[in-house]
Image: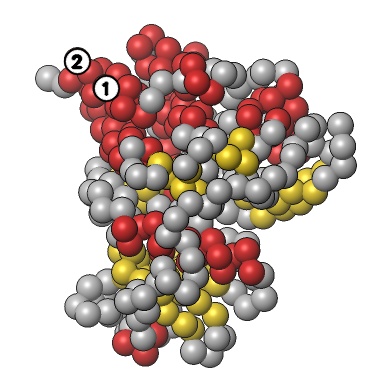
Amino acid sequence: MFQCRVRAMDDRGCWGSFSNIETLATAKFDEGPGLNRRESYKGSKISYKDIRWDKPRRKLGAGGFGVVYRSAIGGWRGITVAVKELIRGCGEDAHRDLEREVDILRRMKHPHLIRVFGLCTVIEENTPAMLMEYMSGGSLSLVIHPPYTSFSLPLSNKETIRRISLLEQIASAMHFLHHAQPCIVHRDLKPGNVLLDRTQRVAKVCDFGLARMRTAAGKATRVAGSFKYMAPELFKHNTVTEHVDTYSFGVVVNETLSGAYPWKDTPDIAIPMRVAVENKRPEIVKEAKIHPNLLKLILDCWRQDPTARPTMGGALDVLKAHRLELSP
């Protein structure tokens, strides 16, 4: 074991520092084409002055490096947008992450990927901001963990179908990314990074600040992500392939169908040892009575050997087949 310090985002979007994590290594990672800061963003600049705001501005959420606001209704070219603004002094890494997110999402068009319009500069702060489509239904986390209501297990047939449909949409988006040229690895797939429309029946994957374009199996220059959803190989040797998204998806499927927070009673600092060394996984809630086909999908996504995990296309097929079985 060697000493290191890493940054990781928890499921609430907060960043913290951790040390003494076994065999975490750092190495150069092939960023892939399309990330040259002087070339990638031609035509993506937007004037901040063109955005109309409510007074006071409506805050949608905040993380360690930025705040997301909603424009006024129809506040930019006749549409309502969400604006992610970096806070002053957040560092060069955060700037690169935001620019990478714009670069990826402006070129990736899929009905279940959040649409990004471009970058602008917040005049008062001289900090960058990203304009993206506004999803009024909140995140998948609000469906799984409703703040003011409770639900009983197992889920009703109708609610199970709705949740499986949302999971299908996520799998479809991830399958699309993994088959892009080059392959795009999200690296931070979790319910908080899946946004819903006002009906909460249409899902879109967002937050690509940690995403990587993979031309070959690579290693990230920093360990970043949400520990509760991270694959064991990220803790062991920080290898980034599309299989890390599959592992995360398995955690999302389990959480969505059971309503249970992953690693609820485990401190974040202990998760790397549990996952990578002890080969432990989040709890399977028996009361949820997850169907054996879906339970097998979850466990397959959690395999220690990354190459033994299903593809996102395979996961999509399993979900779709089960939803059709349940549908009247």
Q: Quadrant of the N terminus?
A: top right
Identity of the amino acid at label 2? Glu
Answer few, some or many: residues within 10 Å of disc 2's Cα (few below 14, many 20 plus, some between 14 and 19).
few
Whether residue 128 is visible here, answered yes or no, is: yes
Q: Quadrant of the C terminus?
A: top left
Q: Position of residue 46 (x, y in %)?
A: 35, 81
Q: Position of residue 116 (x, y in %)?
A: 33, 64
Question: Is residue 97 shown left or right of residue 92?
Answer: left
Q: Is residue 249 above or below residue 280?
A: below
The residue wearing badge 2 is 325
Question: Is residue 109 shown left or right of residue 243?
Answer: left
Closest to the observer: 225 or 156?
225
Which scheme is used to colour this image of the protein?
secondary structure
Identity of the amino acid at label 1? Asp
Query: Could you say which disc has been placed on residue 317 in the image?
Result: 1
Residue farthest along the left direction in this orientation: 328
Residue depicted at 51% across the width and 56% down the height: 209
Question: Is residue 195 shown left or right of residue 214?
Answer: left
